[in-house]
Image (cartoon, helix red, strand yellow):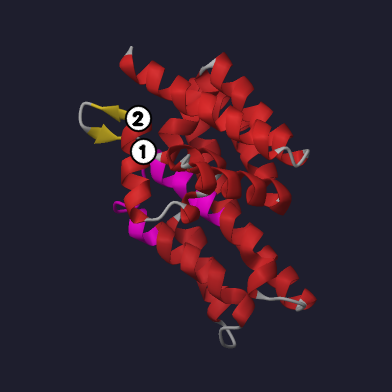
Amino acid sequence: MENTINTLEHDLRKGGIAGSDKEALQKIADIRSEMQGAQIPVDSLDRLKVKINEAKAGIYSQLPGNKPGIKSAKRNLDNVGKSVDDALKLYGKQNPEWEALYRPANEVHGAIAQSQKVRNMIGRVAKKYGHHAILSAFGLTHLMGAAHTLEGLAASGVTGGALLTAGEIGARIWKSKTLRKLYMNTVNSALKDDAVAVNQNLDKMEKELEKENET
């Protein structure tokens, strides 16, 4: 992975840094900050994948009206994302049980990242009704704020004094038939612009996570 991101960074910096290069370069820096020598923890890769999906969804607001720039920025982020995907695939081959949980979750998460409508609805409802603990499961950690990130994750998943990462919350959801159904109900409700149902499903998800944490 290290060689791949070195090559990507070299190509991005060649000839000067354009606005469409900045997000990809930041994500490369994020990857480097998580690396431990030549290796990187799988939960870090999971978080990085979320950040890359969020960055892709935010391109349109960062480069409004700049179609060539948006296309270039998306391509750059796709290339960085592929390096993360390749590392996750390698880990999945070595750990098939993890792979069976990760792949469907990643596919849904990627779809959410590409749907501004779903992101906006879930984010708006979650902030209005205080469902900060569950935002990370939908790749919306940037809406949580530092205090809510700690308080929310602590409320939804403290085990032995350690906070669960967004990836760990995601894993819990995809291991639980009930949580998985509520997750999909939330997404479908957001697609229908049904704020009441989104709020109800988020509330049920939080309560279910808390209940599982007590067992």
Disc 2 marks which amino acid?
Gly
For the view shown, which residue lies furthest in the bottom direction? 15
Q: Measure how far apart labels 2 and 1 are at the Cα level.
A: 6 Å
Q: Are there few (<14), some (14-19), or many (20+) residues within 10 Å of tag 1?
A: many
Q: Are marks 2 and 1 in contact (CB under 8 Å)?
A: yes
Main SS of residues in magenta: helix
Question: For this rendering, which residue is in front, 214 or 22?
Answer: 214
Q: Amino acid at mark 1?
A: Leu
**What residue range appears in magenta?**
32-52
Looking at the rendered structure, the number of numbered marks drawn on it comes to 2
* Quarter of the rendering containing residue 65: bottom right
In this view, the residue in front, 203 or 145, is 203
- Residue that carries the numbered disc 1 in the rendered image: 153
Q: Nearer the viewer, residue 112 or 75?
A: 112
- Taking the image as shown, residue 57 lies to the left or right of residue 5, namely right
Q: Secondary structure at mark 2?
A: loop
Pinpoint residue 207: horizontal percent, then vertical percent.
45, 23
Residue 95 in sight from this viewpoint: no
Q: Residue at x 70, y 43 (%)?
A: 111
Identify the residue at horizontal 50%, vertical 70% (top origin).
25
Report the residue marked by disc 2: 157
149 falls in the magenta region: no
Give the percent coordinates (x, y) of residue 149: 37, 47
Residue drawn at x 70%, y 68% as measured from the top left: 60
Where does residue 126 sit, x and y in percent of width and height? 54, 43
User: In which quadrant will I find the C terminus?
Assistant: top left
For residue 147, side relative to residue 208 (left or right): left
- On screen, 175 above or below 21? above
For label 2, the crowd category at 10 Å Cα-Cα, with few meaning under 14, some 14 to 19 and many 20 or more, is many
User: In the image, is 56 to the left or to the right of 25?
Assistant: right
Queried whether the magenta region covers residue 37, the answer comes back as: yes
